[in-house]
Image (tube, helix red, strand yellow):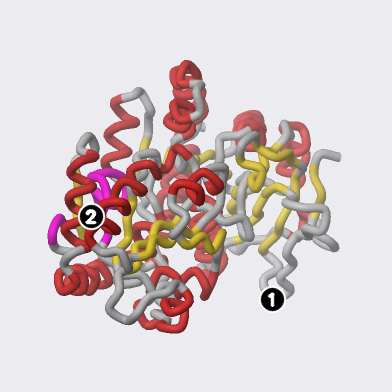
Amino acid sequence: MAYEYAHNLLVDNFPANRRSLRVAVVSETYPPEVNGVAVTLAKVVDGLRAANHAVQLIRLRQSVTDAACEDELHPAYQEVLMRGFPIPRYPELRMGMPSKSALIRLWQLKRPDVVHIATEGPLGWSALRAAMYLRLPVSTDYRTNFQSYSTHYGVGFLYKPIMSYLKKFHNYAQCTMVPTDALRVSLSDAGFQRIKVVSRGVDTVAYDPVHRSEKLRAQWGLAPDDLAVVCVGRLAHEKNLALLLRVFEGIVARDPRARLVLVGDGPMRKELQARCPSAIFPGQLRGKVLAEHYASADLFLMPSLTETFGNVTTEAMASGLPVVAFDYAAAAALIVNSVNGSLVPTDDADGFVSAALALAAAPQKRKHMGEEARQTSLQLDWTCIVQKFEDVLQEVIDQSRVTV
């Protein structure tokens, strides 16, 4: 069979009372995988469960030992594991297999009120087709700029076909959720329809300046007043890391004791280590250790121009770091230039370098901006984000009832 039920859990045990929604959530990535889609989707799922909704999470089996989560205290939660295969160039991530028939059988046994699809791969497409066959309301997320990635891997000619597929995929849904108004406008101009803005939150308890560790900074070879520059994310060409190295070369020319900390892993790691042997590469981190790395730095650089949002921006801000970023994605929505960070026009690489060098040389300004960044992050409570998500799901359900 193309799917496996959670141990001792049948679809018939997927109940909901009249005040709750039965939500089927479909995703080809989920924790413990470390990426923005997985992390934020898990927050939404947790929020839906906390709000007493019945959630059926359909995700990929991540390893031979992976087992569906059981929650005896919340029997309305079910995980269904599907088969997948590694994504080329992204071996730590997996892509689902076509599963339309399996999903039809699954949802015929107990219909969800709404299907929410977080990823556009084969599993997401199968879920979309199954939901359409069963006349189920569907919402989707637009979370990853796959079409932009194509230009970084020598297959720029695929940009238009990928964009055409994504538009077709999302326009079949009753609603597509995006994290920023700028992305809503961009996609609307490209022909995407029925777009709603639902922002992303940040855990301001997990990410907090109190996690700063002088012990960790000493391991980096830094004294209390030395400068630590951090960047968190996949070490890959689409993250514009060549610009990051250019910035750090300028910083080190002025301040030889400064350190660059690159948290993450990916295909560029060896190249980056060769080009910047003094940099620190702790690998892919999560939890308390990741929070300590954020809080123990002094400046966060976000050179990427391929994000739909960029959760690392909000995590850095919650950790009390000033962020230098392009006027794009989360930074465009949250950063006020020279108040809680530095915002640079998207076509101005030289301006990015200048802004980063200026902050690197201004410790008091960094401190003040970091405090303001923390205050900004406190407004991004996940409870409010999940409430907005719930509201959109209810709108999708109500709309489908009117059009049936």
- Mark 2, residues whose alpha carbon is within 10 Å: few (<14), some, or many (≥20)? many
Residue 75, by quadrant, is bottom right
Q: Is residue 151 within the magenta segment?
A: no
Going by the image, does 221 lie left or right of 302?
Answer: right
Q: Is residue 175 left or right of residue 368?
A: right
Q: Position of residue 390 (x, y in %)?
A: 45, 56
Kindly identify the residue that appears in the image at 24 percent across and 48 percent down: 332
| Residue 311: % across, % down | 41, 56
250, 136: nearer the viewer: 250
Residue at which label 1 appears: 73
Which corner quadrant holds the N terminus?
top right
Q: Which residue range is magenta in the image?
A: 323-338
* Residue at the image point whose x is 46% and y is 38% from the top: 237
Identity of the residue drawn at 35% across and 53% down: 199
Can residue 380 be seen here? The reply is no
Q: Which mark is residue 356?
A: 2
